[in-house]
Image (cartoon, rainbow, N blue to C red):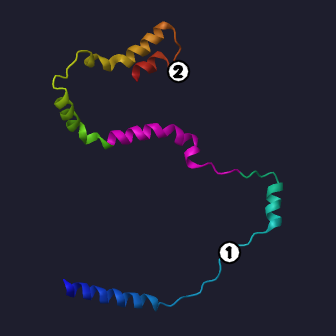
């Protein structure tokens, strides 16, 4: 073990010495100059310079944030369905209720109930039926 540490120390020392002997090449400065008269002409010609909108302030990003988070959470827990069921059954061994079978139809019942009550929705009845 000591021989390995000594050999790696010597190799590291030689590598550091080699790194200091590299040839440095001077490069030309790459700063670009601009013409003030041309810039003022562009500004005065009616061309409007728009500020760049930050990424999280864009409208499409705001609209897609919640679905992206929910989809990611669902994808992260996709393989955990059996584990979740085991934990539920451990703490609630008699988990079986009748209304749980019919609760899946509650959103559709709410749509048709509100439609019958006269509340105007965003979609027509055919589109609501399909979705």
Q: Residue at x 75, y 69 (%)?
A: 34
Q: Residue at x 30, y 90 (%)?
A: 10
Residue 76 in percent (x, y) is at 32, 43
Q: Is residue 67 left or right of residue 32?
A: left
The kind of secondary structure the magenta stretch mainly shows is: helix
**Above or below: residue 112 compared with residue 60:** above
Magenta segment boundaries in residue numbering: 50-75
**Above or below: residue 42 compared with residue 64:** below
Q: Residue at x 36, y 17 (%)?
A: 106
Q: Mark 2 — residue?
A: 122
Within 10 angstroms of label 1, few (less than 14), some, or many (20 or more) residues? few
Residue 3 in percent (x, y) is at 20, 88
Q: Mark 1 — residue?
A: 31
Q: Residue at x 70, y 73 (%)?
A: 32
Mark 1 or 2: the one toward you: 1
Residue 27 in percent (x, y) is at 60, 84
Circle on res. 69: none
Within 10 angstroms of label 2, few (less than 14), some, or many (20 or more) residues? few
Residue 57 in percent (x, y) is at 58, 44
Label 2's element? loop
């Amino acid at each position: 073990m000591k021989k390995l540490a000594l050999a790696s120390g010597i190799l590291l020392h030689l590598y550091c010495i080699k790194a200091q002997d590299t040839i440095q090449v001077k490069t030309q400065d790459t700063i670009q100059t601009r013409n003030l008269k041309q810039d003022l002409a562009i500004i005065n010609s009616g061309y409007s310079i728009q500020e760049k909108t930050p990424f999280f302030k864009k409208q499409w990003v705001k609209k897609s944030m919640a679905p992206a988070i929910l989809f990611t959470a669902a994808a992260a827990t996709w393989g955990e369905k059996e584990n979740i069921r085991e934990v539920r059954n451990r703490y609630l061994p008699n988990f079986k209720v009748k209304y749980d079978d019919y609760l899946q139809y509650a959103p559709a019942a709410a749509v048709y109930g509100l439609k019958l009550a006269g509340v105007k929705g965003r979609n027509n009845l055919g589109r609501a039926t399909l979705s």
